[in-house]
Image (cartoon, grey):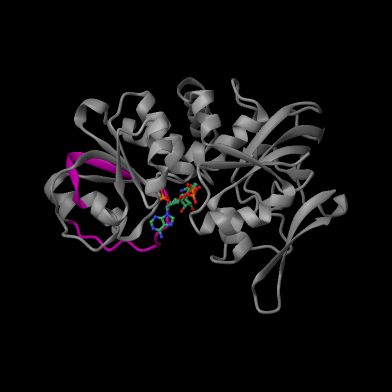
């Protein structure tokens, strides 16, 4: 089968190549799939470039998302011919991932292909889009709604940011998109942003408490950006933190928490339990306009996936990238 294979070089730097991998290399699992689509996520970029040690089994097939058709199943929940998807669970990190024509995985990791989406659309959403939905749900569960004020989205032109903007705008939020790519302002407004700001406004060290600018925030960046989002949040507001594109640190103070009751909501997609995933995919089907999703999506083949990982870690990919596998 065709696969992108990641091996560990002598100096510890990963080496990625499109190769013919024997199916006997597939790992343990109850379900064997013919993979039709995968995607390019930031974590795939970290894995292939070696910028962070996300790969913990060598060799590895990257691809933390996959959509496919069941070929063999020893689990009663899935039968040959079923269309399924998988997001996270360590696939592409500790278990061979989606950038191969076949995958063998645990049945517990699979969801039936979500109603309302084709496999390509489900992968256009992918982990980034489903994480965007988890962040929106977290803000709503905190009691936040458009009447409370503006919402700011950082990393706006990336995968999480693009989908988050579309979802929030659809529910009536006034969305402020923060980006380092002013040339993408028209794209961000097409997705539903009401305002576009330069990410430099948020990325420098700032005061622990600042003018109250937004009721809610979705952050894909971390570091000073996340600290400034907290410092600029209105009384009783919340920031949903899901990413580290600008850094893993968080140089903040307790001031926003104890003086304004601001909440920091942590978002994890990788180990999220199945009911939360089902809720997110159901809401995506209700809220995500297919034409808007298409505007945010680029499709490539397996032969373009390695180059795309270099671009994703440099913040150069726009929106979401689907990998057509088989
Ligand atoms: P993308 O690469 O598609 O988007 C990231 C965006 O962040 C870029 O497009 C860019 O947006 C911005 N950015 C990049 N570098 C910097 C920087 N140095 N400083 C400030 N902004 C920067 O990635 P995704 O959207 O897929 O993922 C975003 C983040 O969320 C990643 O850190 C990823 O690991 C994380 N993530 C976490 C998940 C979880 O379960 N918690 C799940 C999915 C993703 P612009 O050009 O508009 O400024």
Q: Left of 310 or right of it: where is 213? A: left
Q: Left of 284 or right of it: where is 29? A: right
Q: Is residue 191 above or below residue 234?
A: above
Total number of numbered discs in the rendering: 0
Q: Is residue 174 above or below residue 62?
A: above
Residue 284 location, x and y as percent?
A: 49, 27
Along the viewing direction, whichever of 20 and 238 lies nearer the viewer: 20
Residue 95 location, x and y as percent?
A: 69, 53
Along the viewing direction, whichever of 229 and 33 lies nearer the viewer: 229
Start and end of the magenta stretch? Answer: 231-254
Q: Is residue 286 above or below residue 212?
A: above
Residue 274 location, x and y as percent?
A: 55, 34
Residue sitting at x 31%, y 24%:
172
Task: Kindly give the residue lying farthest to the bottom in the view shown.
Answer: 11
On whether residue 5 falls in the magenta region, the answer is: no
Judge whether residue 77 can be spotted in this image: no
Judge whether residue 212 can be spotted in this image: yes
Residue sitting at x 14%, y 54%:
209
* Residue 320 location, quadrant: top right
Along the viewing direction, whichever of 225 and 295 lies nearer the viewer: 295
Along the viewing direction, whichever of 109 and 192 lies nearer the viewer: 192
Residue 186 location, x and y as percent?
A: 40, 37
Q: Left of 232 or right of it: where is 301? A: right
On whether residue 248 falls in the magenta region, the answer is: yes
């Amino acid at each position: 089968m065709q696969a992108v294979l990641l091996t560990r070089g002598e100096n510890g730097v990963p080496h990625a190549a499109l190769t013919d991998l024997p199916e006997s290399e597939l790992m343990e699992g109850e379900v064997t799939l013919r993979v039709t689509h995968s995607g390019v996520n930031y974590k795939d970029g970290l894995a292939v470039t070696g910028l962070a040690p996300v790969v913990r089994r060598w060799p590895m097939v990257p691809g933390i998302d996959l959509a496919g058709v069941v070929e063999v199943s020893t689990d009663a929940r899935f039968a040959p011919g079923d269309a399924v998807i998988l997001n996270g669970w360590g696939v592409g990190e500790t278990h061979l991932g989606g950038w191969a024509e076949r995958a063998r995985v645990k049945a517990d990791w699979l969801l039936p292909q979500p109603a309302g989406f084709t496999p390509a659309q489900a992968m256009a959403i992918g982990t980034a889009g489903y994480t965007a939905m988890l962040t929106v749900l977290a803000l709503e569960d905190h009691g936040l709604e458009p009447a409370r004020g503006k919402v700011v989205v950082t990393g706006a032109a990336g995968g999480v940011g693009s989908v988050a903007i579309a979802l929030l705008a659809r529910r009536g939020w006034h969305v402020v998109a923060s980006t380092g790519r002013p040339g993408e302002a028209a794209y961000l407004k097409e997705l539903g942003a009401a305002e576009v700001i330069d990410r430099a406004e948020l990325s420098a060290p700032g005061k622990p408490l600042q003018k109250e600018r937004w009721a809610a925030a979705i952050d894909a960046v971390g570091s000073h950006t996340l600290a400034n989002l907290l410092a600029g949040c209105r009384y009783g507001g919340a920031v949903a933190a899901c990413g580290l594109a600008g850094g893993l640190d968080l140089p903040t103070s307790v001031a926003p928490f104890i003086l304004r009751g601001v909440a920091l909501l942590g978002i994890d997609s990788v180990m999220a339990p199945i009911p939360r995933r089902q809720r997110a995919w159901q809401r995506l089907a209700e809220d995500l306009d297919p034409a808007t999703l298409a505007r945010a999506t680029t499709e490539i083949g397996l032969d373009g996936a390695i180059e795309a990982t270099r671009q994703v870690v440099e913040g150069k990919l726009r929106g979401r990238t689907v990998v057509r596998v088989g």
